[in-house]
Amino acid sequence: MRTEVVVATPRTGPAGAPNLLDYQLSIYHDVSMSVTRKPVPAASLHLLLALLAGEQHGYALMQRVAELSDGAVRMGPGTLYGTINRLRDEGLIIETTDRTERHDGERRRYYELTDSGRTVALDELSRLRSLVERVHRALPGGATA
């Protein structure tokens, strides 16, 4: 299976100045080739890890992130909902508000991980564990952090 990747190449503008990009050059990438995914940004990682426990609404997510980070990370509404929107756009979480009947005119929005989101969260957790273990082993004299 091949995936098409479009690469920008310089194109000359007026008077021969290279100021435009040509997005027409394609390079084919075979899926069997190793693809290294970038680490998830911190805010996204905190939300993905918070959602590993299951469906939660926005305010509960803010509280869970603070709890999991032992108070070191406190998300404001702008960061929270901006990150939620990005994670939804990436297909890592879905809104589940309408899936279950809510009582008392509740206006909260609920979210949960998609299968892909759960995979990314667990992969990131594994990557971080591995990093901590490697750093711990590399400390001189078995020092602890």
Image (tube, rainbow, N blue to C red):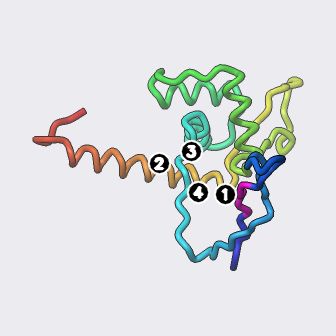
Question: In this rendering, is residue 65 above or below 97?
Answer: above
Q: Quadrant of the N terminus?
A: bottom right
Disc 2 secondary structure class: helix
Question: In this rendering, is residue 87 above or below 83?
Answer: below
- Inter-mark Cα distance, 1 to 3: 16 Å
- Inter-mark Cα distance, 2 to 3: 11 Å
Q: Which amino acid does label 3 sit on?
A: Val
- The residue that disc 4 covers is 119
Type of secondary structure dominating the magenta stretch: strand
In this image, 89 relative to 51: left or right? Answer: right
In this image, 112 relative to 75: left or right? Answer: right
Residue 27 in picture, x, y percent from top left = 69, 70
In this image, 130 relative to 144: left or right? Answer: right
Disc ID at residue 123: none
Q: What residue type is labelled 1?
A: Asp
Residue 84 in picture, x, y percent from top left = 72, 36
Disc ID at residue 125: 2
> Are the residues flagged by discs 4 and 1 in contact, CB closer than 8 Å?
yes
- The residue that disc 1 covers is 115
Which range is magenta? Answer: 6-10
Of the pair 58 and 86, the residue shown nearer to us: 86
- The residue that disc 3 covers is 40
Q: At 44% from the left edge and 25% from the top edge, which residue is drawn?
A: 70
- Inter-mark Cα distance, 4 to 1: 6 Å
Q: In which quarter of the image is residue 60?
A: top right
In the image, residue 7 lies in the stretch drawn in magenta:
yes
- Inter-mark Cα distance, 4 to 2: 10 Å
